[in-house]
Amino acid sequence: MADPLSPHQSEKADALRRLHRAAGPPLVLINAWDAASAAVIASTGAPAVATTSAGVAWSLGVPDGNVIERDVAVALVARVVRVVRVPVTADIEGGLGSDAAAVGDTAMAVLEVGAVGVNLEDVAPGAGDRLRDVADQAERVAAARAAAESFGVGLFINARIDTYLRSVGDPAGRLDDTSRRAASYLEAGADGIFVPGVVDPETIRELVAAIPAPLNILVGPGAPSVGELASLGVRRISLGSSVAAAAYAVAEQAARELAATGTYESVRTELAYGKLNDLVG
């Protein structure tokens, strides 16, 4: 369990917050799904490590989408924190609990194992593309903030809004709906806003102008470059589950190659055994 009075954890929280400020380049996160991937990412000089809920779920044998149990998810965060020195921010999906009090418990749990940030999404589990009521989600954000204040560490709460990712409502009103949700979540204690599903530069520009907080964009092939996003005012850029999915694609490719030709070219770019051992040792 992390010590809430530890200057080390508080320093990590302060460092994560500074990485979101307007001066300097945006924070670019290559999301990890287990301890080894986190260690590899940190070894490249990444200033912080974020987990991906989808990658974490897949690695533990369950589907993404608020299915994983809190204790299991928190245990993985603890392993990630153990192997890296940089700030860790944990994707806790919808809070890994049915009500605001449970979200507060989850926030407290990830703080106790040393994380200093969370992603908290507003999609309603098991409800297709429906999002939570704004007031309900704001209450959940407020519970996470209250837990952090009780713990004594400045947890960075990145409030995710799924209006674009899930094509919620009339496209003409989507920007206003996103802005309204962002304002409510920020008032409740969020520090940043994550709007996945947007790659159009003009829409991103409008979101930056409408949201008075660091904006996080999800990227992948076809999205604007880091430099282009920085010029639009984006402060945080995430690869999400794509790196985990690419790693699993290598596993599938290697299995198919071995079965089809009896060769092993698919794993030619593997990391050295000794390097991986040292990174998690």
Image (cartoon, rainbow, N blue to C red):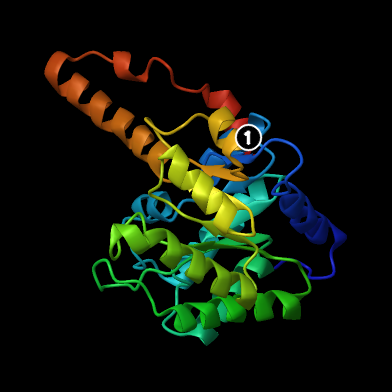
Q: Horizontal and vertical percent for residue 257?
A: 20, 20
- Residue beneath the point at 39% across and 14% down: 268
In the rendered picture of this protein, how many numbered marks are placed on residues? 1
Q: Can residue 69 be seen in this view?
A: yes
Crowd around label 1: few <14 · some 14–19 · many ≥20 (10 Å): some
Query: Is residue 207 or residue 122 the one in the foreground?
Result: 207
Q: Which of 18 and 92 is in front in this view?
A: 18
Vertical order, 255 against 1 (above or below): above
Instruction: Please say if 88 is above or below 158.
Output: above
Q: Is residue 79 above or below residue 46?
A: below
Secondary element at tag 1: helix
- What residue type is disc 1 on? Leu
Left or right, residue 24 beside residue 65: right
- Say which quarter of the image contains residue 213: bottom right
- Residue 70 at x, y = what percent? 47, 71
Q: Going 40% across and 40% down the picture, which residue do you hit?
A: 200
Q: In which quarter of the image is residue 212?
A: bottom right
Left-right relation of 123 to 46: left
Residue drawn at point x = 18 percent, y = 25 percent = 256
Residue 275 figure quarter: top right
Q: In this view, does 169 lie to the left or right of 39?
A: left
Q: Quadrant of the C terminus?
A: top right
x then y, percent, for residue 138: 53, 78
Relative to 138, is 80 above or below? above
Q: Which residue lies furthest to the left in this view?
A: 260
In the picture of the structure, the residue carrying the numbered disc 1 is 279
- Residue at 27 percent across and 24 percent down: it is 254
Quadrant holding the N terminus: bottom right
